[in-house]
Image (cartoon, grey):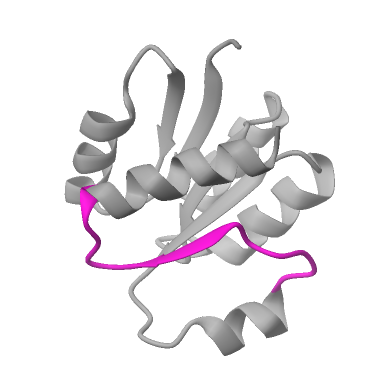
Amino acid sequence: MGQKKILLVEDEAIIQTLCKRIIQCPRYQLKVVSTVKEALEALRGGAPDLLITDLKLPDGNGTKVVNEAMAQFSQCAVIVITGSPTPEKYFEDNFDQPISTVISKPFEIEILMSAIDQALQEKQ
């Protein structure tokens, strides 16, 4: 099994740094972007195995990134990181396909790593 490609879309520097520290290993190839525009450009470059995205981004909503990834790449797993205390209704109204996992901020490292492993296993 080769390296899994992970696209992280997050504008908060502290979360970017945290994710880089815990995700960067020989099993994963991590690309980090901060905006919807950068994420859509990255998706044009090929399919990630996993998309991890925040919903509130400086130039729009991460929903657009999720829907684009799901439309283009059916095997792409998706983890949404959100500060919303009740995201369930939002997801029901805005996504055509199920999200692998929703993680609320702040989150523990172990929760993110477990979600990554589970999401990638489900899409194999």
In magenta segment, residue 107: yes
In the rendered image, residue 103, in percent from the top left (x then y), is placed at 40, 64
Q: Is residue 65 visible?
A: yes
Image quadrant assignment for residue 98: bottom right
In the rendered image, residue 38, in percent from the top left (x then y), is placed at 52, 40
Name which residue lies at 72% across and 71% down: 95
Q: Is residue 11 visible?
A: no
Quadrant of image for the C terminus:
top right
The span picked out in magenta is: 95-109
In the rendered image, residue 31, in percent from the top left (x then y), is placed at 44, 28
In magenta segment, residue 26: no
In the rendered image, residue 61, in percent from the top left (x then y), is placed at 54, 67
Name which residue lies at 44% across and 17% down: 27
Above/below status of 78 relative to 62: above
The tally of labels here is: 0
Main SS of the magenta part reads loop
Above/below status of 99 relative to 77: below
Question: Is residue 3 found left or right of 98 in the rendered image?
Answer: left
Q: Give the farthest residue toward the left.
A: 14
Above/below status of 65 relative to 7: below
Question: Is residue 92 found left or right of 121 in the rendered image?
Answer: right
Quadrant of image for the N terminus:
top right
Name which residue lies at 35% across and 85% down: 85
Name which residue lies at 59% across and 89% down: 89
Above/below status of 68 relative to 48: below
